[in-house]
Structures are given as structure tokens and as C-alpha cells.
Image (cartoon, rainbow, N blue to C red):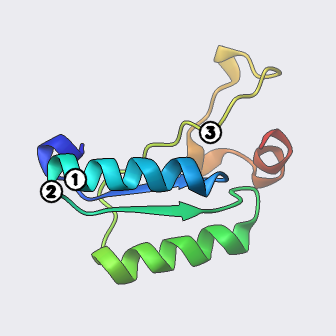
């Protein structure tokens, strides 16, 4: 995404790795990249992060979430993120 000129927000529990990637993206693609450390199982942390992103960039165009895995869910029981129960989300995370 950075190669296409997009601003990128990197979110992880491990800030050291994210900061290295942040600097690499900025240097290589001359774009804005920001690394945040966030516990995505904590709703207040997520809201705080969202507010920081909106303050910096004014909007969020794309969200890619790859931090989810639920071994108890079959492909037939999959639902959209909006319909996924927050309690189950927190258990899995």
C-alpha cells in the first residue's frame, strides 16, 4: 500500500518490530507510516487508537485485520465483522 502512495498505520503489541517497519516504509516509499502499540482485546485502547488515526489522517479508507484466528469456527458459521459478537472476539484474541 505504501508503494502506491497510501499512508499506513501499523498496529501490533510489539512496538520495536513495528517501528523498524515504519521507518523502512517512510524511507523506501516517501509516504507517511505510523506504528502504534495496541492491545486489540481492549476496547478503550482501540477507541484511543482510532481517535489518534482520525486526528492525524482525518479518515480511514481501508482496514486490514489479520490478527484473528478461531479454530472453533467452521467456514459455514462465518459472519461479517459487524455481526461478530464482541465477547467471542475478546476470547479469541
Mark 1 surroundings within 10 Å by alpha-carbon count, few (fewer than 14), some (14 through 19), many (20 or more): few
Quick check: 69 left or right of 71? left
Residue that mark 2 sits on: 30
User: Residue at 25% across / 63% down in the picture?
Assistant: 32
Quick check: 87 left or right of 50? right
User: Residue at 50% across / 51% down in the picture?
Assistant: 18
Residue that mark 3 sits on: 67
Quick check: 80 left or right of 69? left
Residue that mark 1 sits on: 27
Quick check: 26 left or right of 47? left
Q: Position of residue 5 (x, y in %)?
A: 13, 51
Q: Secondary structure at mark 1?
A: helix
Q: CA distance from mark 1 to mark 2?
A: 6 Å
| Quadrant in the picture for the N terminus | top left
User: Residue at 25% across / 59% down in the picture?
Assistant: 7
Residue at the top extreme? 75
Quarter of image, res 69? top right
Amino acid at each position: 500500500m505504501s508503494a502506491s502512495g497510501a499512508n499506513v498505520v501499523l498496529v501490533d503489541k510489539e512496538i520495536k518490530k513495528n517501528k523498524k517497519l515504519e521507518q523502512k516504509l517512510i524511507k523506501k516509499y516517501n509516504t507517511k507510516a505510523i506504528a502504534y502499540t495496541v492491545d486489540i482485546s481492549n476496547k478503550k485502547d482501540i477507541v484511543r487508537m482510532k481517535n489518534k488515526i482520525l486526528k492525524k489522517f482525518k479518515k480511514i479508507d481501508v482496514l486490514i485485520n489479520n490478527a484473528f484466528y478461531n479454530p472453533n469456527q467452521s467456514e459455514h458459521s462465518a459472519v461479517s465483522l459487524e455481526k461478530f459478537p464482541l465477547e467471542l472476539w475478546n476470547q479469541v484474541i
